[in-house]
Image: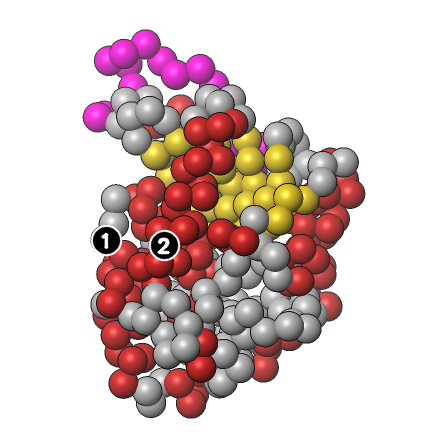
Amino acid sequence: MATVVLLRHGRSSANVAGVLAGRSAGVELDDTGREQARRVTDRLSSVTFDALYSSPLTRCRQTLEPLAAATGLAVQVDDRFAEVDYGDWTGRTLSDLASEPLWRTVQAHPSAAVFPGGEGLADVSARAVTAVRSLAAAAGEDGVLLVCSHGDVIKAVLADALGLHLDGFQRIVVSPASLSVIRYTPLRPFVERINDAGDLGTLRPPPAPPAGTGDGTGTGDATAPAGAGGPAGGGPAGPDPDRASDAVPGGETR
C-alpha cells in the first residue's frame, strides 16, 4: 500500500465569485490560483512521486501543470476524482442555495444528500474512496502518489481514512491548494496531514520501529511528524476569498 498526497486545486474564478462551480466548463484558476500552483510545486520539490492523477476538470489540470513539468510525469486523468455533480445547484450562488431545504441536510447529514438532477454525496464518497484505495494497493508499499481533486471529494476520502461516518465530513477543512497525506497500510490508513500548507520534506517515513517501540498504540504511526496544517475541525463561518468554506458543498466558491 502507498502514500497518497491529496491536493485540492488552486483558487478559481468561481471561488472568488461565490458560485458553486461544480462541473461547469470554463472555470479556471485565477492569478492567485496559478501562483498557488507554482508554490505547491516548490513545496513538493523534495518528494519523488510515482504517478500524478487528476480530476478531469480544468482547474485541477492547471494546478498540476507546473508539477508535471518539474517532475516529467504525465498527468493521468481519472474521472473518479471529478467534482461532485451538483445537478440543478450548479452555477448558483451560495447565498441563494442557503435557503434551500436540502442545504440543512448537506450540512448535518451529507450521507443522505442527493442533489436534484445530480448525484448523492454517498456515491461521491464510494467512487473516490474506491479509486484511492485501488491505486494505493497497486502502487505497493513504497509508492507515493498525488491526486489533485476537489474539496468535497478530498473530504470524503479523508473521512474514510479517519474512520469517520460521512455525516462528519463537513468537520474537515480542505482549503484551495492545500495538501493532505494518507499512508495506506495493510493494518489501517494513517492520516499524516490535513489541509497542510507547510514543508513536506519528511513525506517518506523512516523504517517502522520494532513492534512495541512505537508511540502509544499507533503501531508505528509516529514514524512521521504531525502535519503543519490545521486539525480536522470546522472552519470559520465567514467568507474568505482565499479559501472556500468547507461547511458548504464542494468548497468550490468564494
Question: What residue does disc 2 label?
Answer: 125
Q: Residues within 10 Å of mark 2 (few under 14, many from 20)?
A: many
Residue drawn 34% across and 63% down? 121
* Snapshot quadrant of residue 245: bottom left
Residue type of the residue flagged with mark 1:
His
Magenta segment main secondary structure: loop
Residue drawn 55% across and 36% down? 145
- Residue 38, can we see it? yes
Q: Nearer the viewer, residue 152 or 208?
A: 152
Boundaries of the magenta span: 200-217
Labelled disc at residue 240: none
Q: Nearer the viewer, residue 199 or 96?
A: 96
Q: Is residue 231 above or below residue 122?
A: above
Numbered label tally? 2
Q: Nearer the viewer, residue 156 or 217?
A: 156
Element at label 1: loop
